[in-house]
Amino acid sequence: MMNKISVFGSTGFIGGNFCKLYEDEVVTIPRQQRSPATSDILYLISTTDNYNVYSDPFIDIDTNLKVLIETLEACKKRKAAGEEIIFNFVSSWFVYGKTEDLPASEDSFCDPSGFYSITKYAAERLLVSYCETFDLKYRIFRLSNVLGEGDPGVSNKKNAVQLMIQKLCLGEEINLYHNGDVIRDYLYVDDVSRAMLHCIRQAPVNEIINIGSGHPYKIGDLMNYAKEKTNSKSKINSIEPPEFHKIVQIRNMFLDTKKINSLGFQPVYSIEEILDKIIKQYNGEGI
């Protein structure tokens, strides 16, 4: 078990990919278990969008905060028994919220909106406070938008870019907010997994680290690329965002990645290669 990583949230899209790529280096922790099996922890338990408030306003709080504290309590017991715990927490660009400081660096002001975004930021702050109180070590990974084949959670609420590519492949019309001029930062799921392992093995502890491409991409440009690549006859419409989207979502975001680049990490896949992989999936050419 020496140097293996206890992965919480191994059944999700990103966690599952990480465990598949590095199966010899991980121990997958069952869903209801709170205690890690090793001293290095990768924690991915989380909700994934801001829309749960309509169906269950407590789920973001229970999942993103309560379960986290239960897991930290179990880690504290292992620390008391003499184990050196390093808690690697997977967060999101959503914590930056409506900051105007772009690209958003790890030191940028955070002003999140929406239950998911707010509880992710609260989880970060609780983690730091808990670790400082009980002498645990931590890292926080703030991920950009993650793309890749096989994501079962693709919807209008999460990873809408892939949903729109699927519609283009089917010849269905798609709707873009703000004429497609919305800016996001995208990284392929394998690169995200590589970046997390790289940081777990080499990054200083007690740090926040952005994981992204560091490049601003207009969603409209991505859709035009996918439409041309698929010879799609789909109509691309420009519409106004719904009111709830305006409340919880921001228009533009991309990440400052100087810190992770200085640690020796660079993405392998270009945005075109990522889109090509997704197009192949939705064209029935396999994953």
Image: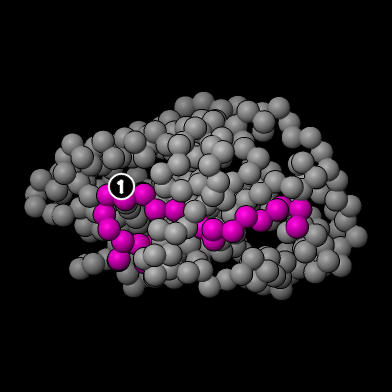
Q: Residue shown at 9%/49% (left/top)? A: 81
Locate residue 221 relative to residue 247 in the image: left or right.
right
Q: In this rendering, does residue 103 appear at all?
A: yes
Q: Amino acid at mark 1?
A: Gln
Query: Whole-percent x and y of residue 175?
Result: 80, 45
Locate residue 235 relative to residue 43 in the image: left or right.
right
Task: Find out whether residue 164 is within the magenta segment.
Answer: no
The part of the image, by quadrant, that contains residue 285 is bottom right
The part of the image, by quadrant, that contains residue 216 is bottom right
Quadrant containing the N terminus in the rendered view = bottom left
Query: Whole-percent x and y of residue 215?
Result: 59, 59
Q: Residue shown at 50%/40% (left/top)? A: 96
Total number of numbered labels?
1
Task: Find out whether residue 208 is within the magenta segment.
Answer: yes
Query: Whole-percent x and y of residue 72?
Result: 25, 42
Query: Whole-percent x and y of residue 92?
Result: 48, 46
Q: Mark 1 = which residue? A: 33
Q: In this rendering, does residue 37 appear at all?
A: no
Locate residue 143 relative to residue 84 in the image: left or right.
right
Label 1: which secondary element? loop
In the displayed structure, 264 sits above or below 109; it is: below
Locate residue 214 relative to residue 164 in the image: left or right.
left
Query: What segment carries the magenta color?
Result: 196-221
Q: Residue shown at 59%/62% (left/top)? A: 148
